[in-house]
Image: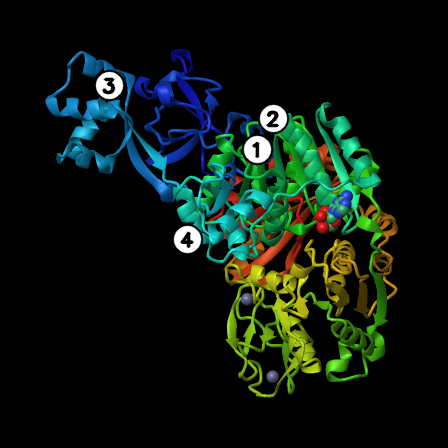
Amino acid sequence: MTDAQSYIEVAVALPVNQTFTYSVPPFLSPFIAVGKRVLVPFGQRRLTGYIMGPAIEAEPSEIKHILDVLDQEPLFPSSMIPFFQWISDYYKHPIGDVIKNALPGGLTLYDYASLSITDRGKTALKNKTVTAIQESVLKLLETGPCRLKHLNDKLNLNLPGALIQTLQRNGWILKTRELRTASTKGRTERHIELGKPVAATDRLSKARRKIIDILGQQGEMSMSELKKQAPSATRLVRALEKDGYLTVRHKRVYRDPFGEPINADTAPDLNTEQQNVIAQVNDRLSQGFATFLLQGVTGSGKTEVYMQVAAGVLNQQKSVLVLVPEIALITQMERRFRARFGERIAVLHSGLSAGERFDQWSLILQGKAPIAIGARSAIFAPFAAVGLIIVDEEHDASYKQESNLRYNARDLAVVRAKQNNCIALLGSATPSIQSYHNAQTDKFIEVNLKQRIQQRSLPAIKIVDLRESMGYRGIRRFISAELHRSIKETLDRSEQVLLFINRRGFANFALCQSCGQAMRCKYCDISLTYHQKANALRCHYCGFSRAATISCDSCGSSEIKKIGMGTEKIEATVQSLFPEARVARMDRDTTTRKGSIFKLLKGLNDQSIDILVGTQMVAKGHDFPNITLVGIICADLSLSFPDFRAGERTFQLIAQVAGRAGRGASPGRVILQTYNPDHFSISTAQDQNFLSFYNQEIHFRKTLKYPPFSRMIHLKISGIDHQLTRDHAAALGELCLSLKTSKPSVYDTVDILGPIESSLAKIARRYRWQILLKGTHANALHQFISRLMADHPKVFNDRRVRVVVDVDPISLL
Ligand code: ADP
Ligand code: ZN
Ligand code: ZN
């Protein structure tokens, strides 16, 4: 930057919705760049900030100057700044904290100080205006930056700290903090090729000749493959290599989550539907921003469409961002992309260590990985320019972050695509009502895959009315005769079964037989769930756990009866019904350990599991060809949720779980047990008729002015003190009302619902209240909340009662 620009705009990670102007002392000027962190004085403190660009407005008299530049290289490209600003405005979140959220965590953990020489330092050195000891330090730094702690070793001296400080103060050296990247060494494998030809006169043993013959016939191969054909290959190859008959190279190998190496694949011949979709997207590629909604039934080959569209974009030297809802699916997507595109892939998700994540981040920053695959936070991948953003399973609620910066990555994908003037491609078998409505109103372009690959039929769904087994006790209440018979038939054919139940644990709750009270969590006022393995009652909201052998809190009776069912109970039941079968369970309780999901998926893959019982985790996108029966134990659990999206969730869940069946050559079937066979979410899911579901659901949304016919902002008010929290909620409610009445012409489209106590009235010791703002005009609604926050900062930043602003909430509990 030139002198004229020696004022910069800095965002600090504080709850303030503005950036600040700082001046740059000349010796730091050469190191200033957008995207680097700086150390700045702020009030009495020193804070880390992010350089946003040259100052918007400089008032030299009052301005403080920055103390240091903390990075050698920018952490994000300047083209992302408008994106951060948009997020800050829309989600009402301080800009500095938006950036902090976007960057890979744990940056400071890896900091270490590095010294480098400045231009001034070089001049000083040339002019010999330095002491002897200063000279030796500067001379060393002229050869390149050096870590502070290595300086003493290299100079074989014991440098006083004051010396470094003097050098810094003179502006001769710069102390930056660099990031140590935990170098994750990739696995490599030996690959063997033929070397010099064997001359007729060469005398080789039979064993050696065999090796050469194998390679001659089959071409280059890995040592492990070769060993399968010639067990003593290791020794022979070494000798042959020495004599020059063979060459050995170390190749990086990528393994899938099951530990198998990923072999390169070639694109299959596309079917007509796939060709049409790809042609439609490609037609728009050169025309700037557009959002496509790809509705393709489960198993219709959406991933193949993603890869082929991506290939076109990569050919134009642009980058591709792929969002996938969760880690197990990321690995599946990664595997398929690696098989097609090789090493040019970075992966971003919470399963990586801080160091690994930073490495992946750097790969993208340096332009070494034009493809990034990840969970919702990958929407922040630091590409300077994106050419395509893919969002797989776009309906999935896990794209919404439910803490701190509450963003929706699916929505941000569209925003980022618009800012980058490129394509967003959202795909799902069961699109969200929101996205489908956008397609109906021409905001998105709808494209379809209606057939499964190779015309495989969608599984037939048979509904079993649970009301008919209400009179039964025990097992037969939840494993109907029909389901029982089908499991048996499937096992007899050596095929696999998936049983889905949307609740963890063994029993729903424990009830006192003498006074009728349910055992509740001390902190959350939520009934506790019985877990048999641990013989404990657990709170599913805060994790509180107590021994199951308790007596009633209210009356002291020790006659506690456990009611209902969950994954653990179904697992135990099924195991007792089919003692020979190998039964496993996949839910949050069995997958807390790193790698445990993959172990379960591997079990399904190599068929060492016959029956898998699980929560919605099993519903998502996995592809296991030998699963031919899916049992939905009780479809009503999600239907009875107090949420306007309950019907949408239920439809999606059923269609998604059902989609796990019959993905291989043998047809699949689904048994759906429910107390509400006539509910339209269930009957339309039975026919997998999305359009029919949509048409009924959208009517209901319209009548009640729910999204997509309105937008919502959820104010969550919580505190430890019951009375204070309630008063705070009441006061905030009053402020909302008076703002609305102050400008009726602007705000008459904003409805204020509440304050009311939340349906989960207490979680982890905190009492919870809420106000729901609902507006048919997005602009008015956003103006409303911005005004409210600007006028009453104290109400939103109270020490004792927390107010969280959740824009476009997904969960209203
Ligand atoms: P979806 O993502 O829609 O559920 P996938 O992309 O996983 O479907 O495709 C299902 C299976 O069909 C995968 O095993 C995939 O490799 C295969 N497949 C996709 N397209 C083709 C094609 N054109 N020809 C043959 N097989 C295909
Ligand atoms: Zn009791
Ligand atoms: Zn609790």
Q: Which of the 4 image quarters holds residue 218? A: top right
**In this rendering, position of residue 373 left or right of residue 188:** right
Q: CA distance from mark 4 to mark 1?
A: 40 Å
Quarter placement of the C terminus: bottom right
Residue positioned 63% across, 49% down in the render = 325
First reached walking from the N terminus: tag 2 or tag 1: 2
| Labelled disc at residue 568 | none
| Labelled disc at residue 121 | 3
First reached walking from the N terminus: tag 3 or tag 2: 3
Residue identified by numbered label 2: 317
Farthest residue in the front direction? Answer: 201
Give the camera-side residue of 119 and 338: 338
Q: How is the image coloured?
A: rainbow
Say if mark 3 contacts mark 1, CB within 8 Å: no
Q: Is mark 4 within 8 Å of ligand 1?
A: no
Label 3 packing within 10 angstroms: few (<14), some (14-19), many (20+)? many
Give the camera-side residue of 785 and 647: 647
**In this rendering, position of residue 738 left or right of residue 648:** left
